[in-house]
Image (cartoon, rainbow, N blue to C red):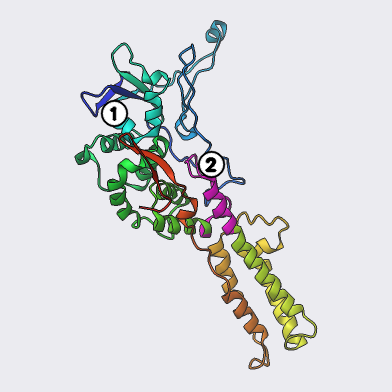
Amino acid sequence: MGTQRHIIDPHGDTIITLRNPNAPFAVPSGNEDFYGSASIPKSGAKRKRKPTDDNGANPGEEPAASRARIEDGPSTAAEKRTQSVTKLPEVPEIDFQVSSAHLKLVSPYFRAALDGPFRESQQAADGLRHVEASGWDTNAILIVMRIIHGQNRFVPGQLQPEMRAKVAVIVDYYQCREALVAFVELWRLSLGDYLTPTMPGRDLVMALLPCWVFRWADEFKKVSEQLMLRSRKPINPQGLPIPESILLTIERKRRNSAIEMTQTIDRLLECFRREPPICSFECASTKLGALERELLHKEELQFYEKEDKKYVGYSITASIKAMREIRCPNCANYSRCTGGKSVEIEVAKLGAPAGLDLQTFVQPTQGYIGNVEFVEPSGLW
């Protein structure tokens, strides 16, 4: 199957060859009601480039999410004769003819690749420089390249949630956020239409990435809050380059909310076990028994009795709702009894955790406009 070519710049001196285009994206692991994993994987490792060796090895490494290649392992002639091999359909390569000057102006990645001691900096036999990429969505990289080359009339003003995340992955990898500022603000306007309390977990994770990459502070707070409230375990980033510090903070705040509920239950049990009783023996005994029954039979409160306090399998939203629905029998001496009011007071103190402050995770970044070096402050656009 032949190579397809998109000519972004007909006079461009560089070819980006996209191998394994349109690889599976943000694939969830397992059949979960809210996507997560028992432990948070390491992510955000520094990407280092290596000079070309004598064998012409390709420098750099694509992110894990974009390396979904199928490679045949070595097999001997005897194995080939004795084994039945199913040949997979060939995946076409896609070329993008672009300008190295435009790429280097906006991207430290391309500046290092095209000006450094790497194979990409050398002209090939066809007189062009060649850069390899793998796994990107074809339309997503077209959007990024057209913006970089000023072809704004070909760029959509709105993006679907998954395409927004695909563009964000590419922008994060090539470190070219500054070049997309104008369009980023257009795409931001439509994000609110998709942020609903019933938004699927995979979509929430995909929404978090562009909020981080494009520095959307308000949306970042809203999405991270939804993840805290609705997730039932540590968030699985699904191969997306979401910083580990963000995932860890979301999980820490989720657990802290569950711990707060545990402490509230402790205070209520202690209140009804107290001697002398806060009201009467009959009243305290009735309320204590009722509370213990609620803890036993309300599924979203059963984390209280578990020795493992990782709170896996429980969402904050559902557990707070269950706490507010705890039934407390009325006392015969209702006007004087403070036991029922204790339940109301303690439960009223419970509050949902607030979303994350984006600025907490933003560090000053170094960049270039032309040949002039600048440092972007930690403040947002």
Q: Residue 206's mark?
A: none
Q: Give the residues in magenta.
A: 229-254
The amino acid on which the numbered mark 2 sits, given as a three-letter code, is Ser
Between marks 1 and 2 in the image, the one whose residue lies nearer the viewer? 1
Left of 351 or right of it: where is 207? left
Judging depth in this view, the residue of 306 and 157 nearest the camera is: 157
Residue receiving disc 1: 101
The secondary structure type at the circle numbered 2 is: loop
Residue 285 location (% of width, % of height): 75, 81
The three-letter code of the residue at mark 1 reads Ala
Q: Nearer the viewer, residue 95 or 77?
A: 95
Q: Which quadrant would the N terminus be assigned to in this image?
A: top left
Mark 2 is surrounded, within 10 Å at the Cα level, by few (under 14), some (14 to 19) or many (20 or more) other residues, namely few
Q: Which residue is mark 2?
A: 29
Q: Quadrant of residue 259?
A: bottom right
Question: Given the current orientation, which residue lies at the most extreme front position?
Answer: 372
| In this view, 322 is above or below 76 | below
